[in-house]
Image (cartoon, rainbow, N blue to C red):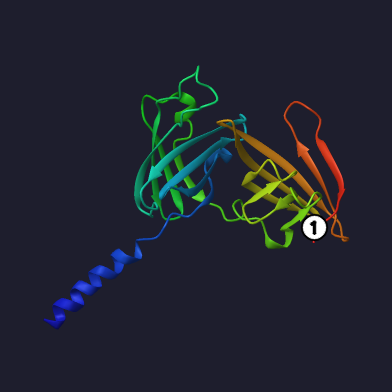
Amino acid sequence: MMKNLYFLGALLIPCLAQAVPVQLGTYIGVREKKLNISVYQHAGIYQYQLIMQRPQTGDIRFIVASESKSIEDHQQVMFTVPDNAYDEENPASLCQTNISFLGNKILVSAASNCSLEEQGYNGQYAYSEPSSVIPKKYWGKWDDCKEPAYINKSGFSSDGYHHHGVLGVEEKGNILELYGYTIDEGQASGQHMNFKFYKNGKVDITTHYDSVRPRIQKNLKKCT
């Protein structure tokens, strides 16, 4: 009898060990393709959001999934393109993308009815902590302390109003270069900002745009 109990326990332990929530953050694929997975809860439902970006082409899009419980490793989930309440004239793509969570890797497989652009994200991606987590030494708030520019573990902003998730982090001396994304009125867009740090606690923020000159905010005082 005791041998049977030990045997059952040996079977149960690996099963329990596999019940681990997926790693949130940024994943890197071939040719610098990037994914970022995040989640929030609404009315007891887990709302997952997967950002997909190809920096070379400037293409960025997002897909979503709603789950009654958190997604775990070694699970497959179907993500879809959300309806855009701000663009009722153009219906959302019917593309369905199967996402397989494999430890610290994600496998993307878009259905055959998806466009070539959507299928272009097919493949395997590996989790990147340096592209997901901003080092703590840079965290802070500056300028208007009611709606400050800020940097935290996984996000940043130049004004406290537009909030950006992280897709990439580069440290260059006293300059922190951040690549990210935001979703506004149902559309995803990429973001690129530089934070230049001074010994007195102040920062300069440069926001880069594709078609216009950068916006520079100088000598922003740190909130206390």
- Quick one: label 1, few (<14), some, or many (20+) residues within 10 Å? some
Q: Residue at x 40, y 53 (%)?
A: 70
| Quarter holding residue 122 | top left
33 over 1 or under it: above or below? above
Residue 104: x and y in percent read: 46, 54
Q: Residue furthest left?
A: 1
- Apparent side of residue 177 relative to residue 59 in the rendered image (left or right): right
Q: Secondary structure at mark 1?
A: loop
Along the viewing direction, whichever of 14 and 123 lies nearer the viewer: 14
- Total marks shown come to 1
Q: Residue at x 30, y 67 (%)?
A: 14
Q: Residue furthest bottom?
A: 2
177 over 20 or under it: above or below? above
Q: Residue at x 55, y 25 (%)?
A: 86
Along the viewing direction, whichever of 27 and 1 lies nearer the viewer: 1
Residue 48: x and y in percent read: 46, 44
Residue type at mark 1? Answer: Cys
198 over 76 or under it: above or below? below
User: Which residue in the protein does label 1 denote?
Assistant: 223
- Apparent side of residue 33 relative to residue 9 in the rendered image (left or right): right
Residue 33: x and y in percent read: 55, 39
Residue 69: x and y in percent read: 37, 52
Dividing the image into 4 quarters, which one contains the C terminus? bottom right
Dividing the image into 4 quarters, which one contains the N terminus? bottom left
Along the viewing direction, whichever of 40 and 218 lies nearer the viewer: 40
- Apparent side of residue 30 relative to residue 7 in the rendered image (left or right): right
Q: Residue at x 64, y 50 (%)?
A: 155
